[in-house]
Amino acid sequence: MRDIPGRLGLEPGHLLAALAVTAALAFIMSLSVGPSGLGIDATGEARTLIFHEIRLPRAVLGALAGGTLGLSGAALQGYLRNPLAEPSLVGVSGGAALGAVLAIHLGLSQLWALALPIGGLAGAAVAMLAVVALAGAHGGPVTLILAGLAVSSITTALISLALNLSQNPFASVEMVLWMMGSLADRSLAQLWISAPFILLGGALLLTVARALDALTLGEDAASSLGIDLRRTRFAVVAGTALSVGAATAVTGIIGFVGLIVPHMLRPLAKYRPGLLLPASLLGGAAMLLVADVALRIVQPWVELRIGVLTALIGAPFFVWLVLRTRAELAP
Amino acid sequence: MRGACFRLALTLGAATAVLGQACAAQAQPAPTRIVSLDLCTDQLLIELAARNRIAAVTHLAGDPAVSAIPEQARGIPITRGHAEDVLRYDPDLVLAGPFGVAATVDLLRRLGRNVVVVPLPDDLDGVRVSIRAVAGAVGAPARGEALIGELDRRLSALVPPAGSAPTAVIYQIGGTVSGPGSLADAALAAAGLRNMSAAYRMRRGGQVPLESLIANPPDLLVLASNVDEYRTALADNLRHPIIRQLRQRGASIELPWRYWLCGTPHIADAIERLGQARAGIEARRP
């Protein structure tokens, strides 16, 4: 916050255009790399299948999931005025994973395909409400993180219980899928199921831009500027639950994207939470796509999982955030 | 009897320890209250010992998804496998596998129980070793040799034709593929198929992306379970449109785990089914 605002900042239009170009390039890169070694210029029947059924769903899902994580991270940080808010850190992703696990293992997703994303977003909504209720509207960073930790522990315990009780001999391996998300080998069917909810939730989150700008002046000032605080709260909670819930139901938990992206882009967006929303949407999409490309190029003997990679990048960043916060709080 | 034991132990150096125990057990009267703690020893025990000498097996022995002989396991008491539960049966012989029950085995031995740990085979010779180990331990070596003889007879009826072997991949939940050094790999070889896992840059098995599979498809796609058997996120890879495409275009069979998860005589069922699939592919060749 002690940087000179504006020195790093770009014109809003230029910033968003630059991020959009980066995300588009990352999307094209995501389509062009894969274990089969086929480039984007390849021809033939296998090429059609590989691009249409494997790489396209993966790239679109990567863009949607990354965008939704970045956007919801920015919205949560702006709304809670707390730099540590993030969907996976505050338990929302865990709630979504639990909802999806229950939908699958209770057999609901067999009866009705939409049960999976709906389970995910119901779980996300419950977790989100629980964290907000636990932390209180004016809770500081520590209270929020503690509330998020508590809710995350509960969701992890319940996911373990559901898988422990299931008849599936691969339950322990499936546990790994939910705890460290993956974009590998997803199909168009899974994309069609989750995309509408992700887009709807994202649209809802983008509507709070003006409210978040006003909230930087405090709640009273925002109210006097004509901001409906209850509507804002509803949009943030419902938007996060819809978008993160649906994305997590298909990819599993992908952590830290929602934490890092808004932090990196905040100075570029001149510390305006409203502008940070679309910027983090594009930045999150670009980051997750680049990470997904990286783990397909750097191939050790087994394929790395995207959630492991984002955690490897994100956890040290989190340490740095703690150190910086400590320095700021020091007398 | 004793001499036969020593000869066996000499020819099968790797299994000496197991047979040593088995032969020592034989000097005493054959055990009558046998408990098994492992799906694979469950099945060997049921094949080899009279029903009235089996005290308990695991619940997996009756699970048709993983056991080759679920009907024969029906009615046998089920143990959860903890030492205390095992002791309820006052066993004079406990059969265990090499994984997951080390603490229980250790505890039972310290309590003076006779425990035989049967190795998990990773090739067909290993299957013979396991059969002999259990047969010796339960005091039914003749029945063991009869089972091995039957296995060898079925295998020798399946001599693959000369020429280049068709390729195959055993594709499982989560994209896992059986690699060299596994019993499934040995079953492919015995059926005259060449495991293609090496073509996907894998040494001992692992996950293969669908993209590699469709870019470099095998002659025979072997699915390790029914596509709709497990409705979980992890098994979604078996329902991917790419797998449907591969099955429409080329040969594929479903070869459930129960045939090859354990080294029992039923590995011959797996090999025969693979052999039929191979013959089908060769008949269609120009």
Image (spheres, rainbow, N blue to C red):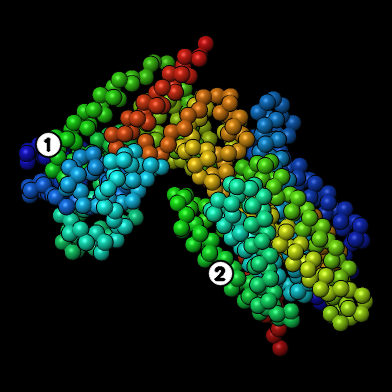
Labels 1 and 2 touching (C-beta < 8 A): no
Which chain hosts label 1?
A: B
Instruction: Tell me the residue that label 1 is attached to.
Output: B7
Name the spot of residue A110 as percent of width and height, x first.
58, 47
Q: Amino acid at mark 1?
A: Arg
Residue under disc 1 on the same chain as residue under disc 2 = no
Which chain hosts label 2?
A: A
- A130 or B137, nearer to the observer: A130
Q: What residue is rendered at 29% in x and 53% in y?
A: B78
Name the spot of residue A260 as percent of width and height, x first.
71, 63
Mark 1 crowd level (few <14, some 14–19, many ≥20, 10 Å Cα) = few
The label on residue B283 is: none
SS of the residue under disc 2: helix
- A319 or A199, nearer to the observer: A199
How far apart are labels 1 and 2 at the CA level? 58 Å
Instruction: Tell me the residue that label 2 is attached to.
Output: A153
Q: What residue is rendered at 58% in x and 39% in y?
A: B239
- A294 or B161, nearer to the observer: B161
Q: Quadrant of the N terminus of chain B?
A: top left
Instruction: Identify the image quadrant of residue A227.
Output: bottom right
User: Horizontally, is A147 left or right of A10 in the view?
Assistant: left
